Image (cartoon, coloured by chain):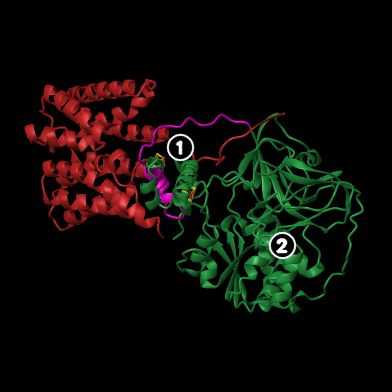
């Protein structure tokens, strides 16, 4: 008889990193396929221009950290690339995307901030044309379906998205937000703001984070929204830690 | 609202209508261990004859707990033996004479509701009643704190997956349990009692409800199927909707496990020491998962032989449930009052761990509102750690359970407790 000893707990939930990544990937692939259908294969070039620099940076980083390099470790890079591609203005040059992604990839790696919003905020400095002319209803429907799918599979910090989207809906209902703007901001609310790596963890702060960013988003333009996400993602790490400290006392 | 999560459940495996009484083993192994006290002094010698229910040793701490023999027979040896936490502790080995001789035998009491509170506390102390939820906390100590008890919660929640020993008691002994609750309520002037159960226990309470008509102050309350709702603090604050800082007793709420209540019944009825309990033997490696009544000191190996053996030869043995329990390296562990069940699983490959993805799940499930991911991140920074209060951890394991990166966060939090503790020493 062979008896092995292990560390508990001896049962684990079926939520795995891989499952979360696959769930997000499925949603993003569907959204991107629809974007390709609307805007053509230019979207694929955007995707490659974001993916390549991020992939190189991550491989270099892992080599430096002496980590094993397997493709499965870079699903996160694919996810970031797919999210960024969804939001890049259509007529942005590949060289610009390549260069800025390289820069933001390095900064993101060093300071653990929201590299998606940082990248997009820099891109918008050079190209502020946002195309929102496509079929918003189908796009909106896809977004809502992905949000439900992501929440159901617990692959998203849903509190952040929910409070953000709630603000958008309120402003939409009081007619301070057009439908195409609502859809664009929904895209940010589902994919960019609750980005795991650089968002708060305690529930109250998650709601607060979504709320503040919701207000900033509806009262300003996309450019400021991305800058706000980048800056607040750093500030909120400290607020979140402070809150965790307080909560642990009670 | 209760913090926690619904676990993957495997209770159906061991739920049966009846439970088996295990045939006594030839040798009984009684560890010299009481609550928070290992290797306590024993002045008996090899060759001494002991009676069933005889006190073998006493702890000399404030708890004053007793080590009691579960059989009559001759002491064959006193030596270090493997204990349920996988360490070696001094253990008395008794050769069972199968006579179950008792030194003082009293008849059964007709009415157990006539005791006074101090009589009950004395009976609990003399007969070794301890918490049967796995803690083995001395019950006489809990009741003897000289605090007013207004409410009693009988905890039949049984949080652990695979374990159904409380369920078996609830199902099998409804009238006895109600009688004991009534006796406690009368003696300690407790105004009301709530028996807390989880939804899935529904089948178990049908009989119970039939008996309850005669006890208007005892109620049943269903609690959500969220682990660890059975944790005393969680349970009391959920049932009475109050904030509890440290212990339900600060709100005059006494919480007792349902199996403890049954043991109290036996002590009040027969005035005899506790010498055994119902435990669950379950897991995918067990041929016939079931609940059994077993005498303290019986080795797991003897039990397994008795209930039909195992399916596999490469196994993991978990004492006290897969969430809060620990694994042991031998089949020769003796069953004690703090064993609620044994889960035996076919050996499995550990899941690969990944870097933290900052999903926040561990933070949002922790029932005591700790932030395991931050504790892990700062585990080498004593000053920061202190601010995160890792020593509040109740070791429920929920953070490790939920983590998608399969990080053993509970281990990190326990390590952090050590760091903070060591810091306090200087
Ligand atoms: S093991 Fe400790 S830190 Fe982890 S969830 Fe339970 S109480 Fe919280
Ligand atoms: S659950 Fe695991 S992956 Fe998620 S924040 Fe906690 S440690 Fe990180």
Residue at mark 2: chain: B
How far apart are the two marked residues, 1 and 2, measured between alpha carbons?
38 Å
Mark 1 CB lies closer than 8 A to ligand 2: yes
Say which of marks 1 and 2 sits in front: 2
Residue at mark 1: chain: B
Magenta range: B347-375
Rendered image quadrant of residue B57: bottom right
User: Looking at the image, which residue is at 71% across and 38% down?
Assistant: B286
Q: Which chain is green?
A: B
Residue A22 screen position, x and y as percent = 38, 32
**Magenta stretch: includes residue A107:** no
User: Looking at the image, which residue is at 39% across and 43% down?
Assistant: B373
Relative vertical location of residue A148 with respect to residue B108 in this rendering, above or below: above
| Mark 1 and mark 2 on one chain | yes
* In this picture, residue B222 sits left or right of residue B4: right
Which quarter shows the C terminus of chain A? bottom left
Q: Nearer the viewer, residue A224 or B372?
A: B372
Rendered image quadrant of residue B205: bottom right
The answer to whether residue A206 shows anywhere in this view is no
In the picture of the structure, the residue carrying the numbered disc 2 is B129
Question: Dominant secondary structure of the magenta stretch?
Answer: loop
Residue B114 is labelled as none
Which quarter shows the N terminus of chain A? top right
In the picture of the structure, the residue carrying the numbered disc 1 is B407
Residue B375 screen position, x and y as percent = 40, 45
**Circle 1: is it few (<14), some (14-19), or many (20+) Cα within 10 Å?**
many
Relative vertical location of residue B284 with respect to residue A60 in this rendering, above or below: below
Q: Earlier in the sequence, mark 1 or mark 2?
A: 2
Rendered image quadrant of residue B326: top right
- Local SS, label 2: loop
């Amino acid at each position: 008889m062979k008896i092995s000893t292990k560390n508990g707990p001896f049962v684990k939930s079926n939520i795995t990193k891989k499952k979360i990544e696959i769930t997000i990937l499925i949603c993003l692939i569907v959204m991107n396929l629809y974007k390709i259908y609307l805007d053509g294969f230019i979207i694929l070039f955007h995707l490659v221009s974001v993916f390549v620099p991020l992939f190189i940076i991550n491989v270099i980083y892992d080599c430096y950290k002496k980590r094993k390099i397997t493709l499965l470790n870079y699903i996160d890079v694919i996810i970031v690339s797919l999210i960024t591609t969804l939001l890049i203005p259509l007529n942005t040059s590949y060289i610009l995307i390549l260069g800025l992604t390289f820069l933001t990839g390095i900064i993101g790696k060093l300071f653990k901030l929201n590299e998606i919003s940082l990248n997009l905020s820099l891109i918008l400095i050079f190209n502020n044309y946002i195309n929102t002319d496509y079929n918003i209803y189908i796009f909106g429907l896809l977004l809502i379906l992905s949000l439900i799918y992501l929440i159901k599979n617990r692959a998203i910090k849903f509190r952040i998205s929910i409070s953000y989207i709630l603000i958008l809906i309120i402003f939409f209902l009081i007619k301070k937000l057009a439908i195409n703007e609502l859809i664009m901001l929904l895209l940010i609310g589902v994919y960019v703001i609750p980005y795991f790596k650089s968002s708060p963890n305690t529930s109250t702060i998650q709601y607060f984070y979504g709320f503040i960013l919701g207000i900033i988003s509806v009262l300003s333009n996309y450019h400021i929204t991305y800058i706000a996400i980048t800056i607040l993602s750093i500030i909120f790490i400290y607020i979140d830690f402070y809150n965790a400290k307080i909560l642990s006392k009670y | 609202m209760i913090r926690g999560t619904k676990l993957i459940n495997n209770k159906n495996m061991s739920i049966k209508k009846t439970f088996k009484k295990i045939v006594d083993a030839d040798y009984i192994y009684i560890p010299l261990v009481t609550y928070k006290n290992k290797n306590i002094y024993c002045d008996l010698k090899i060759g001494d004859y002991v009676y069933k229910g005889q006190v073998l040793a006493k702890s000399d701490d404030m708890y004053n707990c007793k080590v009691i023999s579960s059989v009559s027979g001759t002491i064959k040896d006193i030596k270090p033996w493997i204990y349920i936490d996988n360490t070696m502790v001094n253990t008395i080995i008794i050769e069972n004479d199968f006579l179950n001789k008792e030194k003082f035998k009293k008849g059964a009491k007709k009415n157990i509701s006539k005791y006074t509170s101090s009589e009950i506390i004395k009976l609990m102390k003399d007969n070794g009643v301890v918490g049967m939820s796995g803690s083995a906390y001395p019950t006489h100590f809990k009741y003897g704190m000289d605090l007013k008890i207004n409410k009693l919660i009988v905890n039949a929640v049984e949080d652990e997956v695979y374990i159904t020993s409380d369920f078996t008691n609830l199902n099998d002994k409804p009238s006895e349990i109600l009688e004991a609750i009534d006796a406690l309520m009368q003696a300690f002037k407790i105004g009301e009692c709530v028996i807390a159960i989880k939804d899935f226990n529904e089948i178990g309470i049908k009989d119970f409800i039939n008996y309850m008509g005669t006890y208007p102050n005892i109620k049943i309350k269903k609690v959500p199927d969220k682990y660890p709702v059975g944790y005393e603090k969680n349970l009391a604050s959920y049932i009475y909707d109050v904030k509890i800082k440290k212990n339900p007793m600060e709100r005059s709420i006494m919480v007792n496990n349902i199996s403890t209540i049954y043991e109290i019944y036996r002590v009040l009825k027969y005035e005899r020491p506790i010498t055994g309990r119902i435990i669950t033997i379950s897991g995918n490696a067990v041929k016939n998962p079931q609940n059994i009544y077993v005498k303290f000191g019986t080795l797991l190996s003897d039990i397994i032989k008795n209930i039909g053996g195992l399916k596999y030869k490469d196994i993991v043995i978990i004492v006290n449930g897969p969430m809060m329990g620990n694994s042991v390296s031998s089949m020769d562990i003796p069953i004690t009052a703090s064993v609620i069940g044994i889960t035996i699983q076919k050996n499995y490959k550990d899941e690969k761990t990944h870097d933290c993805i900052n999903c926040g799940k561990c933070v949002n499930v922790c029932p005591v509102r700790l932030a395991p991911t931050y504790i892990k991140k700062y585990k080498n920074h004593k000053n920061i750690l202190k601010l995160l209060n890792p020593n509040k951890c109740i070791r429920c394991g929920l953070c490790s359970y939920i983590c998608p990166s399969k990080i053993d966060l509970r281990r990190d939090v326990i390590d952090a407790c050590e760091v903070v503790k060591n810091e306090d020493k200087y």
